[in-house]
Image: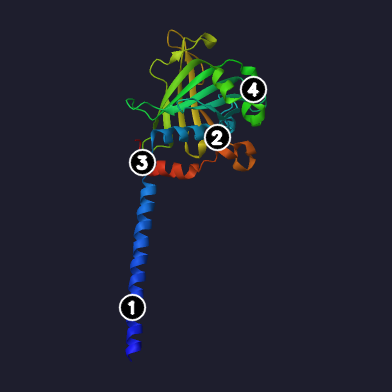
Amino acid sequence: MGTNSNDNNNSVGWNRAGGLIMKTLVLVGGALLLKRLTKSTTRWDHARFVSQSLSGEKFSKEQAARDPDNYFNIRMITCPAAEMVDGSTVLYFEQAFSRTPQKPFRQRFYTVKPCSKEMKCDVELSSYAIREMEEYKNFCDRTKDQRPLPEEIVGDIAEHLTTLHLKRCDRGKRCLYEGSTPPGGFPNSWSGASYCTSEIAILKNNEVHTWERGYDEDGNQVWGTKEGPYEFKPVPASSLKDMFSPLNFSQPSMEKRILEGSFVLQ
């Protein structure tokens, strides 16, 4: 009888201990999960997310089909090219008509970095001309061994063109980030313009809207669409080339954090 009583007591003791261990594990696991989900995001996280969202191959095909009188089917392709000494990402960017992707009509370098702490923005996106544009045609379509070296790329960054200041969009809006050039834009002499303005919005699923316009000295628009921004959407994942596989940076989880409001600027 005494042996059975001791066995029962031991069994109860082990059950209680096991229960306490399980409760502790659940509490610790829950705390770690909560900490992970609510982790504050650094200034550089914002910059990295914008770089990732801009990267890839996108088309305005749907918009051109919907409104062919005002929009062309344009291919926009962007990819990481180098890194500056201050940590800024250098992106190569080009646009071409979708039927002639090998003949880009616009080539640029972008630098992406956090806004300085005193500014009321999250990400600074600057565009620059390229010194030897012919050497960079279809840069993103090439293998790495066929591209200029990172140090050559940094040396080929020419004059500054524009800078846009992006902020994380308010909850409830379609966009994740949006921004524009400062009031008054930047000097631009193309096609009779005196200055230009640029706006950008980054939406879910790496969709990007851009609106660039040129104005003369009297404020009359001389180039760019008047109806609204171009809407660039990525090609289906199944048709993406292998070259873009390194750009899958676990973006859905970060995007989810932005939408849920836990993406907090430090």
Q: Secondary structure at mark 3?
A: loop
Tell me how far mark 3 sits from mark 1, CA to CA. 44 Å
Give the label, 2 or 3, closer to the camera.
3
The x, y position of residue 199, in whole percent, is 45, 24
Tell me how far mark 4 sits from mark 2, CA to CA. 22 Å
The residue labelled by disc 3 is 40
Give the label, 2 or 1, closer to the camera.
1
The residue labelled by disc 1 is 12
Give the label, 4 or 1, closer to the camera.
1
Looking at the image, which is closer to me, 79 or 207?
A: 79
Q: Which residue appears farthest toward the bottom when viewing the image?
A: 1
Vertical arrangement, residue 233 with respect to residue 182, above or below: below
Q: Earlier in the sequence, mark 3 or mark 1?
A: 1
Tell me how far mark 2 sits from mark 3, CA to CA. 29 Å
Looking at the image, which is closer to me, 157 or 119?
A: 157
- Residue 45 visible in this rendered orientation of the protein: yes
The residue labelled by disc 4 is 137
Q: Earlier in the sequence, mark 4 or mark 1?
A: 1
Left or right side of 5 for 130: right
Determine the image quadrant of residue 156. Answer: top right
- Tell me whether circle 2 and circle 3 mark residues in contact (CB < 8 Å): no
The x, y position of residue 37, in whole percent, is 39, 48
